[in-house]
Amino acid sequence: MAAPTLRLGTKPGKAWSKLFMLGPAFVAAIAYVDPGNVAANLTAGAKYGYVLMWVLVVANAMAVLVQYQSAKLGLATGMSLPEILGQRLGTKMRRLYWAQAEIVAGATDVAEVIGGAVALNLLFGLPLLGGGVIIGVASMLLLALQSRQGQRSFEYAILVLLGIIAVGFISGLFVNPPDAGSALSGLLPRFEGADTVLIAASMLGATVMPHAIYLHSALVRDRHGFSGDPMVRTQLIRTTRVDVVSALLLAGIVNISMLLLAASSLRGVEGTDTIAGAHAAVTAALGPAVGVIFAVGLLASGLASTSVGCYAGSTIMGGLLRVRVPLMVRRTVTLVPALIILGAGIEPTLALILSQVLLSFGIPFALIPLIRLTGSRDVMGIHADSMPVKFAAWTSAVLIVGLNVVLIALTFGALA
């Protein structure tokens, strides 16, 4: 399939000077440390200790593979995943596919705005609704930076926020380190009742995020452009592995740190099933300084992830509907559902966890087409997935879909 002529992010001859700089994968990685992750991981650690740590390890390994495949697709074809699907699907199927992807992007946005609002409430006592508005406006400023200064400036801003997130959630472990033996026991795959399956699905939805799968293929395309030289494409794809592994390793460390912090400091403490309760418990157990750092990390998480989520939604709509809506307009519209939830007084942590469960249902719709495309020599040429990669990718897809089937059965069983 011939790729269209595209605006190049860097000329092939000059690309080498930027290949080893932190880039698109770190923007995509923000999706893996958003407020939904905070809610799911803290709840898992506080309720069940180290039992579900294996879920994070497996999910992060899946994320590395998935994000690399998405990036490879963009570099090999010069097109994003939504653009390729938009070309291949008929009008009716394209619109239906867009609808489910938009619901997933909307669930992401809700989680991110709510998380930022909770952080402002913890830091400054602001009402949740007012905090949500502030997060929305701040994300508009970040998106304006991307529109006016280019993708690289946006990446720098996101990298700074990612660093703040890492400090915010790792610092508590230095004050109260977890027990090494207990932590290692969490690597043994197991569940302890139906509730742990629900939390595991939430953790999975928060870690392998559909909108990041759609977005990454566009990020690398926009940064590096599309080169007709197979040698340049091969080198870009090789060095993208470093970008992806580095970014997702950092995101994985942050996620595991959240669970370890909750398991070591919050286990059995009353009220830690909410972010506000967890913050109060962290402050009481580890001191006000750690509590402030924790809240600042949550704030950075909400602010960065809502900007990236809006960017992803624009990529999805542009590729599938072939409609370009200005980012500021989109940001204004997608802010409404989160503000309604905040204004209605729904418990924020519950809303965050349910949003992540919804995300887990959207993963197969992004993951299965991605695996089929990256495994096709007609699409990828010499960059098509090898048999071991295909096996790993399809195994990941089966595990994810299987977990969702179990979750559906448990949900309907509880309602019966």
Image: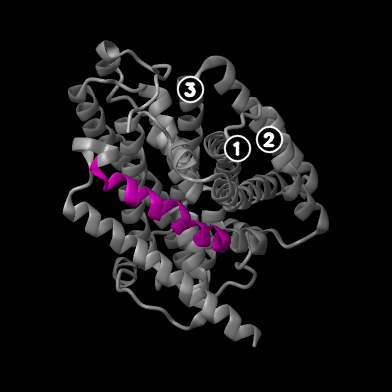
**In the rendered structure, which amino acid carries the disc numbered 1?**
Cys
Q: Which residue corresponds to the image point at 55% horizontal and 41% vertical from the top-left? A: 305
- Give the residue furthest to the right: 344
Say few, some or many: other residues with alpha carbon within 10 Å of mark 1 (under 14 / 14 to 19 / 20 or more): many
Q: CA distance from mark 1 to mark 3?
A: 14 Å
| Most foreground residue, 30 or 283 | 30
- Image location of residue 25, percent across then percent down: 38, 36
Residue at image mark 1 = 310
Residue at image mark 3 = 151
Residue range highlighted in magenta: 356-377
Residue at image mark 2 = 331
Q: Which residue corresponds to the image point at 48% horizontal and 67% vertical from the top-left? A: 201
Earlier in the chain: of badge 1 and badge 3, it is 3
- Image location of residue 89, percent across then percent down: 48, 45
Residue 151 belongs to the span the image colors magenta: no
Earlier in the chain: of badge 2 and badge 1, it is 1
Q: CA distance from mark 3 to mark 2?
A: 18 Å
> Taking the image as drawn, is residue 136 in sight?
yes
57, above or below 327, in the image: below
**In the rendered structure, which amino acid carries the disc numbered 2?**
Arg
Quadrant of image for the N terminus: top left
> Taking the image as drawn, is residue 166 in sight?
no
